[in-house]
Image (spheres, grey):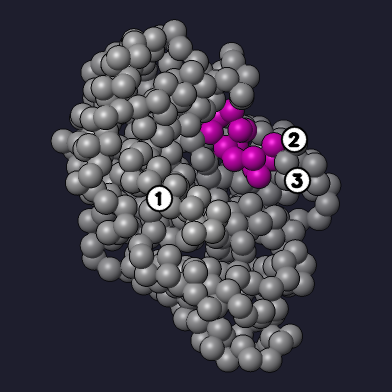
């Protein structure tokens, strides 16, 4: 056995024995995994279907066309580009489809739940553009009137909405209104909630945003990759040019095949049932943690994640993350609004339910996990307790095999 095959098997065991609760992770189907590891990885296909720079692209042309049509059907939009390698590259392409270097952008701050690519100073979005940020109120909610006031002062060319750690619904219609009030473009990053949008469990940004970006691997439960959508044909043409030859070369046709299967799966009735269970599990988790005395940012959730403020528990996000990892529960440290601790430590943790719902967890199992979380965070130095819970987690997960998905 080669070293890498050995390590893949090791990772397979880690995933099987871990309750995955990182909100941006999920588990894609065997069919998607097979497509992503198929002979399609051998094919170079710079350009677009019918307009490639290499010969021998007739099959991958069909695959990419099919992926685009399925994405259009799923999100009810006129234009889709399935080539972006990631959500970050999708955002880069989207920015340059509407902006010039140095233009002003207004996005959600990282410490309030936004993403690095929404204008963080160390990211390309904050280095290439003049970036400004809006946050949340003291309770963790978006204050649309305050955002509009800020927009009137700054006069950005683009407003960016969407989040990576915001547990409530986003009012895309309201963002359109405030963008119009300052004559700005509106870009919506729906990476985290794409699966909820696809099943009409969250308002779609498509009728409101000039351009929409997403990943395909979070709630959408597909392969790791990016996606750009719009209903504006002129913007669609700009996206094409900025994707290739602007920022990317050859698309990953094996990943695009995986995306196509992902869109197929998301169009099935059972995918909505899955998304409904994601929400049930998230709300159950929120309620159980509150019952144990945990403080939640916004006091609950409308989507697939909860954001826990650990200050009342006298423990940092980093320490809580490490303790939970000891019992095979995977979460991530996360900043909270007005966090007094640095991003490397944080005062909170972000916990999501997409992956465990894929494995088959329902409310009963969520209550068990919430109990474990409460006990180990309450007794962080109790090694006997952690050893006991780790074994219980591993035993529990035997009924939910990853390789059967």
In this rendering, would 283 be left or right of 337?
A: left
- Span shown in magenta: 108-121
Checking the image for residue 124, the label placed there is 3
Q: Residue at x 16, y 35 (%)?
A: 364
Circle 2 is placed at which residue position?
A: 121
Q: Secondary structure at mark 2?
A: loop
Marks 1 and 2, the one that precedes in the sequence: 1
The answer to which image quadrant residue 156 occupies is top right
The answer to which image quadrant residue 15 occupies is top left
Circle 1 is placed at which residue position?
A: 12
Q: Residue furthest front?
A: 1
| Cα distance in 3D space between marks 1 and 2 | 36 Å
The answer to which image quadrant residue 120 occupies is top right
Q: Residue at x 28, y 16 (%)?
A: 385
Q: Nearer the viewer, mark 1 or mark 3?
A: 1
Q: Residue at x 58, y 91 (%)?
A: 58
Closer to us: 358 or 138: 358
Closer to us: 36 or 302: 36
């Amino acid at each position: 056995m080669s070293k890498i095959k050995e390590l893949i098997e090791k990772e397979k065991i880690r995933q099987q024995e871990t309750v995955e609760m990182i909100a941006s992770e999920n588990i894609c189907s065997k069919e998607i995994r097979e497509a992503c590891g198929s002979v399609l990885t051998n094919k170079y296909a710079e350009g677009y279907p019918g307009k490639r720079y290499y010969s021998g692209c007739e099959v991958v042309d069909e695959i990419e066309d099919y992926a685009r049509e399925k994405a259009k059907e799923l999100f009810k939009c006129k234009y889709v580009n399935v080539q972006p390698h990631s959500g970050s590259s999708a955002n880069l392409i989207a920015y340059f489809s509407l902006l010039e270097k140095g233009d002003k952008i207004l996005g959600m701050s990282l410490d309030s739940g936004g993403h690095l690519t929404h204008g963080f100073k160390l990211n390309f979005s904050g280095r290439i553009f003049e970036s400004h940020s809006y946050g949340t109120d003291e309770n963790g909610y978006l204050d649309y009137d305050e955002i509009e006031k800020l927009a009137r002062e700054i006069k950005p060319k683009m407003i960016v909405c969407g989040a990576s750690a915001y547990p409530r619904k986003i009012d895309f219609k309201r963002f359109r209104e405030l963008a119009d009030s300052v004559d700005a473009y509106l870009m919506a990053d729906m990476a985290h909630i794409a699966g909820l949008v696809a099943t009409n469990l969250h308002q779609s940004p498509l009728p409101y945003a000039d351009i929409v970006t997403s990943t395909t691997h979070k709630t959408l439960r597909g392969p790791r990759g990016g996606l750009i959508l719009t209903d504006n044909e002129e913007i669609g043409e700009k996206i094409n040019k900025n994707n290739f030859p602007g920022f990317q070369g050859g698309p990953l046709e094996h990943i695009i095949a995986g995306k196509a299967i992902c869109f197929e799966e998301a169009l099935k009735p059972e995918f909505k049932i899955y998304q409904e269970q994601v929400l049930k599990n998230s709300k159950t988790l929120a309620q159980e943690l509150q019952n144990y005395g945990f403080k939640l940012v916004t006091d609950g959730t409308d989507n697939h994640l909860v954001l826990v403020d650990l200050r009342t528990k006298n423990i940092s996000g980093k320490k809580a993350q490490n303790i939970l990892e000891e019992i095979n529960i995977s979460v991530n440290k996360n900043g909270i609004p007005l966090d007094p601790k640095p991003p490397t430590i944080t005062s909170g943790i972000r916990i999501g339910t997409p992956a465990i719902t894929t494995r088959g967890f329902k409310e009963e199992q969520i209550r068990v996990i919430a109990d474990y979380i409460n006990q180990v965070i309450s007794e962080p130095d109790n090694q006997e307790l952690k050893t006991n819970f780790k074994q219980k987690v591993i035993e529990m997960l035997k009924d939910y095999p990853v390789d059967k998905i």
